[in-house]
Image (cartoon, rainbow, N blue to C red):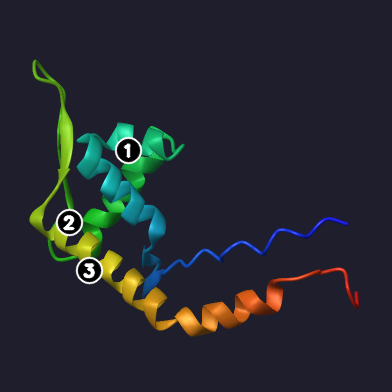
């Protein structure tokens, strides 16, 4: 008789819905981190398995969500193009990640209770 693997930890994901379809969530945050890391919208999207077009759509959405753009880009040329987070972009990303960490920490006991209810032999009584 094998012991079943414990239930995996749930993914804790925060989505901020500002209404009118304006949402800041884990995908946009990950894209922003990728842009900061790679200096490229295309490369950040590729790292996420996202099309170039979709990455640009998300950047355009990010740039209209707040009072100032979050990502700046430059076209190619002799030195090539690139992208970077603006100061506002860095602030928004940091605030979002802080919110995620705070929510996860505040929810620790509830998450542990849910995990305990999932652990064990799931076939009993079913």
Horizontal side of residue 122 vs 126, given as left or right: left
Q: Are marks 3 and 2 in contact (CB under 8 Å)?
A: no
**Cα–Cα gap, marks 1 and 2:** 15 Å
Horizontal side of residue 52 vs 34, given as left or right: right
Q: Which residue is mark 2?
A: 89
* Residue 19 can be seen in this image: no
Residue at 19% x, 35% y is 39
Which of the marked residues, 3 or 1, is nearer the chain's N terminus? 1
Q: Quadrant of the C terminus?
A: bottom right
Question: Please, what secondary structure does the residue beneath circle 2 have?
Answer: helix
**Above/below status of 61 relative to 99:** above
- Please identify the quarter of the rendering in which residue 38 is found: top left
Residue at 29% x, 65% y is 97
**Above/below status of 100 relative to 68:** below
Q: Quadrant of the N terminus?
A: bottom right
Label of residue 95 in the image: 3
Residue at 25% x, 42% y is 35
Which of the marked residues, 1 or 2, is nearer the chain's N terminus? 1
Front of the two marks 3 and 2: 3
Q: Which residue is mark 1?
A: 44
Which of the marked residues, 3 or 2, is nearer the chain's N terminus? 2
- Please identify the quarter of the rendering in which residue 106 is found: bottom left
Residue 23 x, y percent position in the rendering: 37, 65
Label of residue 71 in the image: none
Question: Please, what secondary structure does the residue beneath circle 3 have?
Answer: helix
**Cα–Cα gap, marks 3 and 2:** 10 Å
Residue at 9% x, 56% y is 87
Residue 28 x, y percent position in the rendering: 35, 54
């Amino acid at each position: 008789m094998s012991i079943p693997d414990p239930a995996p930890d749930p993914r804790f994901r925060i989505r901020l819905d500002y209404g009118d379809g304006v949402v800041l969530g884990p995908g946009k945050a990950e894209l922003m981190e990728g842009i900061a890391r790679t200096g490229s919208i295309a490369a950040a999207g590729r790292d996420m398995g996202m099309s170039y077009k979709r990455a640009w759509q998300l950047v355009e959405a990010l740039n209209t969500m707040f009072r100032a753009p979050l990502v700046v880009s430059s076209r190619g040329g002799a030195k090539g193009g690139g992208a970077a987070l603006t100061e506002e972009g860095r602030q928004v990303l940091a605030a979002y990640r802080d919110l995620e960490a705070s929510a996860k920490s505040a929810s620790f006991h509830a998450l542990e209770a849910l995990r305990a209810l999932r652990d064990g032999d799931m076939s009993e009584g079913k």
